[in-house]
Image: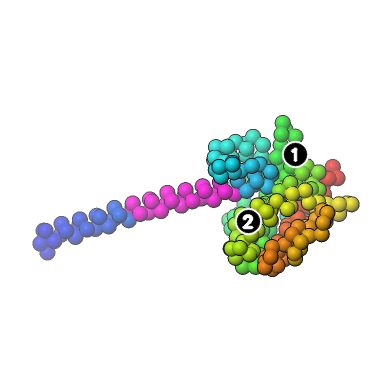
Amino acid sequence: MRKDDLYAIGFAALVCVVCSLVLSATAQLLKERQDMEVELDRKLNVLKAFGVPVVDEAGKKLSKEKVDTYFETNISEVFLDKETGDLLTDFTSADLPPAELRARTIEDKEHLPLYVWRDDGQIQKYAFPISGMGLWSIVYGYMALDRDLSTIIGVTFYKHGETPGLGGEVSTEWFQSQFHDKVIYKDGELQPIQVVKGEAPAGSDHQVDGISGATMTGNGLNQFMNRDLQYYNRYFSKVRGS
């Protein structure tokens, strides 16, 4: 083989290696950025459930710096034993097994995350993830309760694959805002939250209007919201009784 041919082959191989390294590095950087955006969106939805305005009048979201400040100053993450409701004092997210990091619903978890909001060291409210099947997809969200663990402060649904204009309306403000001030604990018992078909009865303290054409999505929300509440109530009942 001629020297020129060897040079051409070597040059082509070098170009391929360099391009491969550049593409690999770019893909890694993009993945890291995407992961950061996903984490920021998750934190924004925790804040939204807590009642924090996350979008200003101009439609601009809270900056990452402001979000991080809330989590450093007001919010702490703790974990509960799903079966007993006990607070796991020495357990952190770093201790979660890989299978639970991939878990999509509470049924696949043994350790339940709970976000606790404090002002001046005093607990004011609690928030926790809720998720389950809608009609076509897993719907992910958060629910926040007041410090008495009886009244909903806010609910957010932020990730799903439901039909736009139908079940997809779960992520709209008009739907989510209905849950504010609904009562989940009454007369010493959990009271199921219910998305009804059509309009909720006037004055109902635990029902919200359904979405036209999305009855199955509403049924899914009813099922997983109340299921998740029952698991978390194993801890909440201890707090109420303390």
Residue extent of the magenta highlight:
21-42
Please state, as top left, top right, bottom left or bottom right, where the C terminus lies in the image.
top right
- 86 and 63: which one is in front? 63
- 102 and 117: which one is in front? 117
Task: Name above or below for residue 33 compared with residue 123.
Answer: below
Q: Which residue lies furthest to the top in this view?
A: 120
Image-quadrant location for residue 138: bottom right
Residue under the point 68% across and 47% down: 49
Residue 171 numbered tag: 2
Total numbered badges shown on the rendered structure: 2
In the rendered structure, does residue 50 fall within the stretch colored magenta?
no
The residue that disc 1 covers is 124
Tell which tag, 1 or 2, sits nearer the viewer.
Answer: 2
Mark 1 belongs to which amino acid? Gln
For this view, does 94 lie left or right of residue 118? left
Mark 2 belongs to which amino acid? Ser
For this view, does 17 lie left or right of residue 229? left
For this view, does 34 lie left or right of residue 50? left
Is residue 138 visible in the rendered image? The answer is no
**CA gap, disc 1 to disc 2?**
26 Å
- Whole-percent x and y of residue 175? 68, 56
Task: Name above or below for residue 162 compared with residue 238.
Answer: below
Residue under the point 24% across and 55% down: 14
In the rendered structure, does residue 36 fall within the stretch colored magenta?
yes
Does dot 2 land on a helix, a strand or a loop? Answer: helix
